[in-house]
Amino acid sequence: MTKNRRGNNEGSIVERKVMKNGKEYTYWMASVTTGYENGKLKRKTYSGKSRGEVAKKMKKALVQVDERTFKDPSKITLEKYLTDWLAGMKCAWAEGVKGPITENTWSAYDTMVRVHIIPNIGNIKLSDLTSKDILGLINKKQNEVKENDKRLSARTVRYIYTTIHKALSDALEEQPPLVAFNAAEGMKKKLPKYDKPEMKTMSITEIGKFLDSVKNYQLNSHHYSPVYAAFYLELHTGLRRGELLGLQDNDINFETREISIKRQLVRGKEGLYLKDPKTKSSKRVITLDERVMSILKQHMDSRAIIKLDRTSLVFCTDEGKPLDPDNFTRHYQTLLDKAGLSHYRFHDLRHSFVTLGLKKKIDYKTLMKFTGHASSKTFFDVYGHSDSEMQEEAAQVYGDLIADCVKK
């Protein structure tokens, strides 16, 4: 059964009632004249679950027709849409509008679009794009061999999919929508599996070896180096790399033994710049031990001696410039190699801080304050594991409990 009903002053909005599997469903439709082609009237139809939803789509379409900015989805190619999609996000930053994604994420999307998506399926009309097209691209990229005879990593292939899915989700949210559905929906099970690198925890002995290696490097260095103070602080705080390198002089309060995390140093397409921390909870104040403050004071005194006081960054190059995060990580790997600990990554320092704290029975909420986690779920998803030493301790505790029960 179908029933049509027009609302007052709402033009061509109509109500439809249909029977499906013995049940009645209601939806609304509207038709908008978008122009003429070859002397024939062109119309675009919109539908929705409510009259208000369709009226909103119709109103925006009519405004676009009047302003001659209406986009006919049947004529937009995927390449055109993705190019405009990326440009729109970039313009928001240029105008000082804080977007839903970071510049690093935008750069990753840009690479996926330019290198992998447009060259392969960019010529397909946006409205004609199917899950088969997307799956074909994914399969092609999985089997594609690069110039160095290596295949794309599973992580990269999955990110190609993530980019398409995000772009189509945004197209679906346009008013009026540019697509009828997200063709990338429901494909995750068909993507290559990606196992995240295993988190490793440095032992107390290994931390000692690492710091000795860093100290020896600094003592033998013929120029200013911030590495010992930087890594010493990192092992006492578990800061993210960008947070560590973004610290400024006025973030340190020697009287209260506190440091304030207010920003992070990141690399964008235009170079290095300071930005707000990752999340709202990432802005935090951390209390430190007197020994850590002493190391920081020595570091800042040595920095002042060679007249690097013109920079506000706590850790900088011998020219007073920001430390490039990637170069800093490469330097870290070199120091690890010298200590015979090359199997650790920089993020393992943060992981070691948390794991060692949990071993010492430090309350997880206190550790979250240090690390800047907002959600306990996220915290435990990342750090809620146990190493062999912690398992051995747990086994001993339960063994003693049961033994006491048996004695009674």
Image (cartoon, rainbow, N blue to C red):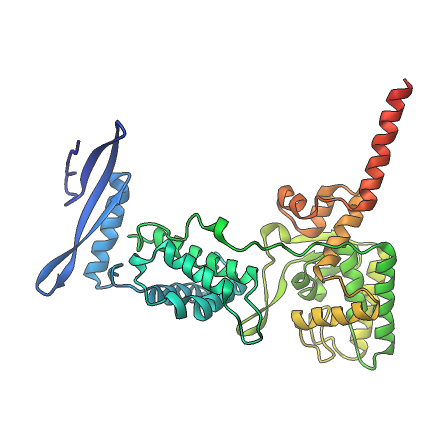
| Residue occupying the far left of the picture | 39
Q: Horizontally, is 76 left or right of 318 in the view?
A: left
Residue 234 percent coordinates (x, y): 76, 60
Image quadrant occupied by the C terminus:
top right
Q: Horizontally, is 114 left or right of 396 in the view?
A: left
Going 56% across and 60% down the picture, which residue do you hit?
155
Q: Quadrant of residue 274?
A: bottom right
Q: Nearer the viewer, residue 102 or 343?
A: 343
Tally of numbered tags: 0
Residue 289 in view (yes/no): yes
Q: Nearer the viewer, residue 408 or 101?
A: 408
Residue 97 in view (yes/no): no
Q: Quadrant of residue 63?
A: bottom left
Residue 36 percent coordinates (x, y): 12, 62
| Residue occupying the far bottom of the picture | 222
Going 56% across and 54% down the picture, which residue do you hit?
193
Residue 85 percent coordinates (x, y): 39, 63
Q: Quadrant of residue 61?
A: bottom left
Q: Nearer the viewer, residue 272 or 19?
A: 19
Image quadrant occupied by the N terminus:
top left
Residue 51 percent coordinates (x, y): 24, 39
| Residue occupying the far top of the picture | 408
Going 54% across and 66% down the picture, which residue do you hit?
152
Task: Tell me: residue 57, above or below residue 139.
Answer: above
Q: Horizontally, is 90 left or right of 294 in the view?
A: left
Q: Nearer the viewer, residue 130 or 379?
A: 130
Task: Tell me: residue 133, above or below residue 281.
Answer: below
Task: Tell me: residue 319, above or below residue 17.
Answer: below
